[in-house]
Amino acid sequence: MTLAAARARVLRALSPLHPLGWVSVAAWRRCSQAGPPAALPHGGYRAWQEQAARDPAGFWADVARGWLRWDSPFHTACQPGRPAGPARWFLGGRLNVSVNCLDQHVEKSPNRVALIWERDEPGTAVHVTYRELLDLTCRLANTLKKYGIQKGDKVAIYMPVSPLSVAGMLACARIGAVHTVVFAGFSAESLAGRIMDSGCKAVITYNQGVRGGRILELKTTVDEAVKNCPSIKHVFVAQRTDNKVHMSDCDIPLEEEMTKAASVCTPESMDSEDMLFMLYTSGSTGKPKGIVHTQAGYLLYAAFTHKYVFDYQQSDVFGCVADIGWITGHSYVVYGPLCNGATSVLFESTPVYPDPGRYWEVVQRLKINQFYAAPTAIRLLLNYGEEWVKKYDRSSLKTLGSVGEPINKEAWQWFYQVVGEGRCTLVDTWWQTETGGICIAPRPSEEKAEIIPAMAMRPFFGIVPVLMDENGKVIEGNDVSGALCIAQPWPGMARTIYRDHQRFVDVYFKAYPGYYFTGDGAYRTKKGYYQITGRMDDVINISGHRLGTAEIEDAMVNSKQADHPDVPETAVIGYPHKIKGEGAFAFVVLKEQTAYTDHVKEELKTIVASKIAKYAVPDHILVVKRLPKTRSGKIMRRLLRKVVTEQSNDMGDVTTLDDPSVVKEILDAYQKYKDKSSS
Ligand code: 7RM
């Protein structure tokens, strides 16, 4: 009944005034050429939205047959998760993801540009055609095979974005290996943790990386990480710079081997539900979890959303400036665009290198048509003024996109008016590592439908959002807020957490049985549009990078030898930050109030950088005598958030506090800290 009600809501929202004249996907497919990318059917957005909400299995089955190249057809489009859990898609079907991303385009247009690698050094872009990318991928795949990597084996990729790192992902897909890309900004300890959890047999890396004119010591970090990883048999090392790095017996010079390898590699025929990759992401508790995506459903959803959310047209240059270390890079730098035969930009640099005009200089030089970025970068750039934007010709731009965190109105307006000259569609896209692709975004929608600034607005085809109240009941009506859930399955949904399916079910399907719980809160406007209000758990979002506050706490407290010996307890919260969106604020308790507190604070920052990554380092560390706790010993982070964000003395209900006098203590300490830092 509740699912029916949710579907009915989507259908009602589609057409409040007149009945729908819809055309089935099958009918559209019959009269159009199969294969991506294609135009919306006659009847448009509403027709598809209506069909996808009413009959998701039928809708996606039709799309999957037309969009992907199959080795053998599937017999069952969707098998719902029982009793609660993720659905499985396209059962019995077999295909190879790299064939869909490469071979099918090479057959038709081998010289079309697949990748434009915008290297850190301005003006040195490298173009790679589909034929060349297939060649690279096959040689890399054959090299992996030569060193014993087989179907089902796990391979870590610790590289910034580049043609070789994309070839690394596709080479794994070609031979049925599973990649786990680790953001090249993560520390050796973070990398080691991911390698151990996933049981990787090999790492692919560069000797060094280059970003913003600075050198990243990638191989050194890998060496430090794999010291403690017995599962690693080989480290494949590519050359990004001319500098020599130490090579040991199990290190393989990648380009050398690729030159010797055959340029043809027979693709492994994979089951739709075989694992394609895992990607580690932070939750509210414990260590980062290996989110698992499978072959067909993920690829289809990434490609389909890439086409329709951004209105991608053949021969457009698609510029998603995300790193491949995040899901955005997987879905909208690599798999979505390449499956659609697009030209995808690989942006290796930063928005301010060599100056704050870099993005727009690249837009002009590469004639980018769709530009997809994070709000944090937009907020950073708007501080430098409009001149940096206006210096460059942006007339190629058609669609702008925002992802990763809420975009505030000021940043939205600047992006829309200054960058897009008020003539480009700007889409605020909401989605998650777990959802595989965009779930809520203003497009696609009927021609000239309104877009409200700073709002994700409309569910994508087949996405049925619902809001839940505290009692787990579906909230009906508009102008309401609640926990954001999704009521029916879609193909891009993650299937499990690697080696911890129970945790997957508990985190996403337990709170609201029968629904996928996103962890985000949302507001449904008077008109029925969705606005994301933020996380409901202890996950914070620093510059669009997800992080559990517990991870930062764990890094600092004295639990193991390596942590800080003077810090028995900490509590970390997120607070609004002008550029980063959120920053980390740490409250720490010291064993003894020493005269060395400043020294300890610096040490704590170093520890967090080396245990997690630089971006995780708290902006503020405040030493307090004790933390506010309930009688059962739980830290009341809500109270700490109030102290920092509201700066009011009214702490609300504190009756569950073990000792309410702690409130004044913390307020005083905070006031002193503020006075000191502003003086
Ligand atoms: C794509 C990505 C997911 C979390 C998610 C939200 C937040 C992402 C938006 C957003 C408001 C948006 N995957 N989030 N996009 N919040 N508006 N358009 O970022 O797994 O790394 O993060 O990010 O809280 O749950 S992610």
Image (cartoon, helix red, strand yellow):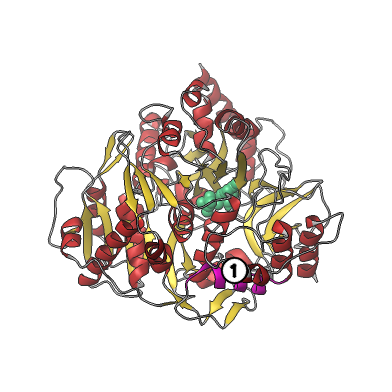
Residue 79 against residue 430 in the figure, above or below: below
Q: Would residue 563 be seen by someone viewing this image from the given angle?
A: no
For the residue carrying disc 1, how many other residues have a C-alpha within 10 Å: few (<14), some (14-19), or many (20+)? some
Q: In terms of image quadrants, where is residue 424?
A: top right
Residue at the far front: name it.
31
Residue 482 in percent (x, y) is at: 73, 53
60 part of magenta stretch: yes
Residue 516 against residue 614 in the figure, above or below: below
Segment tinted magenta in the rendering = 55-69
Q: Residue at x 19, y 66 (%)?
A: 261
Element carrying mark 1: helix
Residue 664 in percent (x, y) is at: 64, 33
Q: Is residue 153 left or right of residue 43?
A: left
Which residue is the site of mark 1? 63
Q: Is residue 336 left or right of residue 651?
A: left
User: What secondary structure is the stretch in magenta mostly built from?
Assistant: helix
The amino acid type of the residue labelled 1 equals Val
Q: Is residue 425 left or right of residue 351?
A: right
Q: Is residue 374 left or right of residue 667?
A: left
